[in-house]
Structures are given as C-alpha cells and as structure tokens.
Image: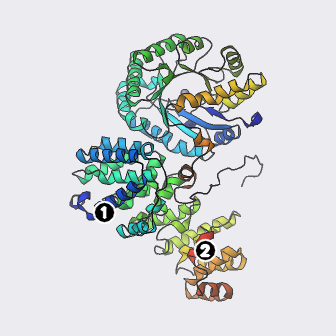
Amino acid sequence: MLIDNMMVIDPHIHMTSRTTYDYLVMKEYGVVAIIEPSFWLGQPRTHVGTFQDYFNSLIGWERFRAEQFGIRHYCTISINPKEANNEPLAEQVMELLPLYACKEGVVALGEVGFDDMTEAEEKYFRLQLKLAKELDKLVLVHTPHRNKKEGTSRSMDICLEEGLDPLQVIIDHANEETVDEVLDRGFWCAFSIYPNTKMGNERMVELVKKYGSDRIIIDSAADWGMSDPLAVPKTAQLMLESNIREDHVKAVCYGNALKAYGQSGEMKEEHWLEPTAIDQRQLYEGNSVLRGQTPMVEKPFQESIIIR
Amino acid sequence: MIATIQHPTETSKTSNIINYLQNCLEKQLHQSALTWLNWTIEKLLDNPSSHSLFIGFSQTPRQVGKANLSLSQEAISTARQLRPGWMPEYWTVDQAVRTLLLLNFQTDEPQEYLASVEKLFSAADVAEQIALYQSLPVLPYPQQFKARAIEGLRTNMVTVFNAIALHNPYPKDYFQEAAWNQMVLKALFVESHLSQIQGLDSRVNAKLAKMLSDYAHERWSAGRGVNPQLWRAMGSFTEGQILADLEKVLREGETFEQQAAALACFGGSAEAQTLLDKVPTLKQAIEQGQLTWDSFSQTHL
Ligand SMILES: [Zn+2]
C-alpha cells in the first residue's frame, strides 16, 4: 500500500494480457482508474472478426472485470501500427472503428503511429487522425521502439499536418531523447515505466526533477511482456521518497492523465470518487436491485495459506 | 415462416409501447434530451438505416443521462397490461430510450430488422447489452431472439446475465426447459436473486428439482451454505432425495432455512405434508398467511 493512500491512474495498461490477481493488487496500491489502449496482442491477427472480439472485450469483459475491484476501466480503439501493415485487414478494421469510437468510456483513438515507419503505417495513421478529427476524439500516439527519435518527430509532424491540436494528442513511450521536442511542441508527453525496454523509474525521478510536472504523464504500458502493473504506484512512491514535491507526483501519476483524457468527456473523477447508484447497479449488481443502497463490492485483500 | 410475421409498426402492441415509452420520457427528460430524441427518431423514420440506429444507440447515455425511469403506480400497471410481466420500473432512461429507438427502426423486411439488431448485439458494450436483453420482451419478432438470449446467458458478466434472468418475462415465455433450467441453476451460481426470476413457481419441473437438489448436496459437501430460495423450485417433486433434503433442512437448518423448507413442503407431495406436520409452528404461520414466499423473499432474495 502506498504512503498516505494516494490515488493513481494508470493511463496505459493492457489488462487483456493480465490476471485478475493484478487487478486485486493494483486496487490495493491505489489505482482507481485505468485506460486500456487497443494494441497488438503479441501475435498477428488474421481476421477482422478477431479485432471485433478484442474491441468487444475492451468495452465489455475487461470493463466488467476491472469494476469488480472498484477500478474504473476506459479504453482507446484503433488499428495499431504493426497490424496496419496488413492492408486488406486494416481496411476492414477501419470500417469497424466508427462503430466503437463513440461508445461510452472510449476516451481516444489509439494506439496509432509508427512501428517500422512503412508507407502502410503512415496511411492508416493519417486515416485514423482524420477519423479522430471527424468524431472530435483525442489521439494516443505510440512512438516506435526502433528509430524512436525520428519516429516521434515524424508522428508529431503528421498530427499537425492533419490539423490536430497538440493538446488533443498524447505522445506515449517518450524518453530522455524525445521529451524536449514533445513538450516544446505543446503535446502531452507520456512515459511508460517498463523494465529493460522503455523507461526505468529512477530515470523518471530525474526527469520530473528536471522538467517538473506540466503535461507529463506516467503509465506502465504493462502487457504480456516482462512488465509491472504496479509501475505507476511504485514510481509515485519512489518520487515521494526522492523528495519530489507531492503536487508534482500527484500531477504526473493522476491529475494530468485525468486532465488529458478527461477532455473526451468520457472520463470523470466523480466516476470513482462518487459513483452513482445507477453505475454501481449496472456495473456491480445488475440493474435490478439495490436502488439507492450501496452494493457490497469491497473485499478485503488478504493472503492466506488456506484456500476456500 | 418469418416472412409472414407482421411488420412491427403494423402491430398495435408495438405502437402502444412506443406511445407509452414516449409519454414516460416526455415527463422525465430535459428539453435538450427530448429534442435530440425526437430528432433521432425522425431521422430513423425518414430513413431507417442501420447506421443511424447504431449512432443513436451509442450516443444515448451521453444525450439523455442514466437516471432511473420514474414511473407512477398507474404507469407501472399500464406496463403490465401492455405486455404481461414487463417491468420498466427497473429500467433507466437510457434503457428506455434505446428500446424506443429499436421500436422506431422500421425496415421493410423482418430479416433486415433482425440482422441490424444482431449487429448491435455483436458490438455492444456492457450497458448496451443490458438494454438490448431487457428490451427483448417488447421488441417485434421476439421469438426470433431466443438463440441470442440463450447465448447471452453464457456471459460471465453478472449484470448482463441479470438483464435476461431477472425482472424479465422473456425467459419464462420463450425458453424451453433445458435453457430455463440452466438459467435458474446459473442464477444460483452467480448469486443472483432467484425471487426476481419471473415464472420461477410456474415453470418448476422434475429435472430442475433434481439439478437443484444435486447442487445443494455439492454445496453441503464443500461446507458452503445453500440459498434457501432453491427450495422454492421443488414444487410437487418432493419425494425421494428431495424429500430427504427437506427433512434434513427442517432438522438441522437455520431458522430461515427451515422456513424455506416448510414453504416447499407446503406446496409439495403428501409425504412432504407429513414432514410439515412435524413443524407445527411453521405450518400454522403458512396456513395463516404470515409466512409466504413473497414475505420470505423480502429478507432472503
Ligand atoms: Zn501499449
């Protein structure tokens, strides 16, 4: 449990690849809301139907599973850069997107952007930016692991060329090499605390010391790889122990994600601070019972050697 | 067979339900929400494209909110007259609006209508699934949604399951025995309130009674409690193993469990009546109408 029960948001985590036990522990460590971007599942999909089922689980099953632990689940919808390279498939997924983009709790289109920086990737990146503009949606941009600096620059160029407002775009997986340009150009700058391949949290402490908290967001990007669903609360704790001002810690681990994605109108603090009876009824207890009463959802977290 | 089914708007039932929902919503929604609703319905009537239906259906909660539908006693009884067993008093405004959109979506061909609703189901989020399953008893061609409703029972989302199983006349009216029995048993597994299943008393059957008794034994072996509402579905099948179960509960159960077992015996076989004689206080309470399944269900759902 975090010091002084700080609430945190993990605005980028792929719960589809994680267990229910992760939800339990995340809740215990103060995670009150998460955003699950639509992304690559580790193996290429070959049919549009598997995309539809994936989108359905993002707006259905995962949302429900999270709510069982009192964690609010939001998502973003897209064809991701890697799979955009399968053009006939990408074409069909593009047709699905409008069906999902306007649903409740869908806070942005994403992850979009580049993987290998191919022509096909750019084509579907641009098409999805156009769709975001048309539907007045935010955009979550995945920046590539290889050739990151150029990929990040190019992604921002394209967003501006397509007429997006930088404040409507979250540039994710930033690092020491890209942070200056992202912030200078007025975009939200997200860092994924992900062991070995992305950002470590000691480095993150140094970054916040240097840049402060304005427009900086941290997330775990936890998925099927070696990653940590507690990356955000752990980093919050490390920052506090490293004498970073509490208001900065709260901004980068909670407030900024809310501010950025809250622009969608789909994510509100009251969803977890004061969930309405209706939401509770629909999400926890069915909509048939308990008008006005508080459903019992909190199960105390306890490890026991006895299994009942 | 399906081609002979009447067009939805041609049935007076559908237009009565449309008027009913429209009236309820006019009393409750703000002007801006009503303006959106009327505009959306007009658009659907002008050009019944599934695209407009999908957009309207997705936008509903943002446009009209999610407040409880507030209905007068009179409105509640009107609902029961329009469609026996229909319980819109458990609905929210977004659910009512979504149903209204489905009813105002008028295609020339039943197949086209069914395909569009199926497409909505196939891309529905949790709240949309709940709205869709709840609307089934008042939709046109209800018989055609049976497979979909049974498929819906397989969900892991209790809220979606409950939208089908509880306060909904659809299962009672359309499910065959196997699906009905599975639904009741699953309701126990997911801890839904059996007393809110419509037709629980009228659709008892020997197979279900046996399944429930087996389930009770499984629970007892695991050292877990048994929902006393389970005994309600024993009906007149109170013999053999089930009779022994009831005897055990009357002998060893907590007070509320004994009450449930006594109620089950009261409606049961001659042997069950003999069992009941052994608990005269409970028998008397039942005979005098102080203990009924309804009164019992106020405290033990
Ligand atoms: Zn990701």
Q: Which mark is residue B16?
A: 1
Quadrant that contains the N terminus of chain B: bottom left
The label on residue A201 is none
Secondary structure of residue under mark 1: helix
Q: Position of residue A190 (x, y in %)?
A: 58, 22
Q: Are marks 1 and 2 on the same chain?
A: yes
Where residue A14 sits: x, y (%)? 56, 33
| B168 up-or-down from A104: above or below | below
Answer with left or right where residue B186 lies relative to residue B148.
Answer: right
Q: Report whether residue A12 is seen.
A: no
Tag nearer the camera, 1 or 2: 1
Q: Which residue is located at x 48 percent, y 64 percent?
A: B167
Amino acid type shown at disc 1 = Asn
Q: Position of residue A281 (x, y in %)?
A: 55, 53
The image quarter containing residue B264 is bottom right
Q: Residue at x 35, y 67 (%)?
A: B82
Q: Residue A1: x and y, percent?
A: 75, 37
- Mark 1 CB near ligand 1 (8 Å cut): no
Q: Chain of mark 1?
A: B
Q: Which residue is mark 2?
A: B296
State the residue lying farthest toward the front. Answer: B31
Q: Ligand 1 is found in which quarter of the picture?
A: top right
Which corner quadrant holds the C terminus of chain B? bottom right
Category of crowding for the residue at label 2, using alpha-carbon neighbours closer than 10 angstroms: few (below 14), some (14–19), many (at least 20) = some
